[in-house]
Amino acid sequence: MVENKPQKLWLYDQTIAGEGLSQIVQDLLKDVPSIGQPNIFPLEWHGDAHGKLAKLYETAKERAWNPAQAIDWKKLDPKDFTREQRLGVMYWYSVLANFDGSGPPVFAKAMIKSYETHEPNELRNAFFSIARDEVNHEEVCYRTVSRLWSQTPTEWDPQNDLEALALRNIRWLYYNGGRYWKGYSKALEEKYPMSVLFSSFMMGEVAATTLFHNMSKAAKHPVFAQGLKKVGQDEARHMAICLAALEHEYMKLTEEDKQMITKQLRAGFVFLSMILYEPPDEFWKLPPEFLEVHRKLEQLAREAGLGVATLSEKKQVWQEAMLKVKTVVNSYGVEFPAMPEVGITGKEVVNISMEDIIPVF
Ligand SMILES: [Fe+2]
Ligand SMILES: [Fe+2]
């Protein structure tokens, strides 16, 4: 470090002879303190500016959309529904918000991590674009729920038993969402390499793409169909981003990484089954009455034209989605976990705990 009295430089009174660095400048270059890591500094922009991820980021910018205008909210008139139907739709979007609505902070956190670990520029941009999209998806949840019911799905006055039980279900769900957030935050800070994180992210994006694609086709109400379609298009791009990132990350997988990925895929299945199918006993802490109320409210949302799949349809769709993920990871030599709930055999993974749940939607 240069102390009080600066050394004399050529800038002041020396002339440079020839090329190269003077000894004084070479020494000065070395005296800059190094930055303790992890840290977002030093900033730089390494990476592949023309690769798949960079192109997907360009597409994301070009396809930006505004939920306030792209969806014709005026046509979502509360008067067109019975009170029970409104309750069902509000309930379903509140359940969705446990996954899709948590997207902004979840991906914002992943983006910060990618800066701290100095991932390639296009990867950091990809996280940013997903976080940006997820704010839109949260907006769709917020607008639907507040237009049909209340801005605060966990705080309103129920007028009958079914409404009280719906409120209770939502509160239980968000309690579990809170447990997920804690586990996710910890996982991101500490234990997992990018390859494992991206396997979990990919799982969530396959789930999301599948869900929105199917529901947008089944939805009978035009406003629901519009919203589901727009969100689904984003989710398909998120899936493509994850697959492109995995191509890069999977080249350097260790045996330990592969085992972690197998466990993570099971954790993802357990977590996402709540929205894609029905919650398994692992991880989810829910009261015994939960499922009966959940099924009743989904039925009401279906009657309102939301396009919620029936249980047998869900099972088939969720199985197909998981088989897609299986094909991808098997091609990189990663064992797929057993998912007996939807009839998929594989490596048995037990004891999924809160800390194991990483997936994002
Ligand atoms: Fe989303
Ligand atoms: Fe997504």
Image (cartoon, helix red, strand yellow):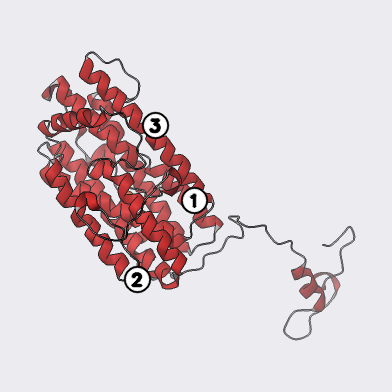
Name the residue located 39 percent from the left edge and 60 percent from the top edge: 261
Mark 1 and mark 3 lie on one chain; the one further toward the N terminus is 3
Image location of residue 333, percent across then percent down: 34, 71
Quadrant housing residue 163? top left
Image location of residue 328, percent across then percent down: 29, 66
Image location of residue 297, percent across then percent down: 19, 29
The quarter of the rendered structure image containing the N terminus is: bottom right
Indicate whether 31 appears above or below 233. Answer: below
Q: Is residue 288 visible?
A: yes
Indicate whether 200 appears above or below 141. Answer: below
Does the residue at mark 2 contact the one at mark 1 (Cβ under 8 Å)?
Answer: no
Mark 2 and mark 1 lie on one chain; the one further toward the N terminus is 1
Residue 188, disc: 1
Q: Nearer the viewer, mark 1 or mark 3?
A: 3
The residue under label 2 is 333
For disc 1, the neighbor class at 10 Å (few under 14, some 14 to 19, many from 20) is some
Mark 3 element type: helix
Mark 1 element type: helix
Residue 151, disc: none
The residue under label 3 is 175
* 10 with respect to 309 (left or right): right
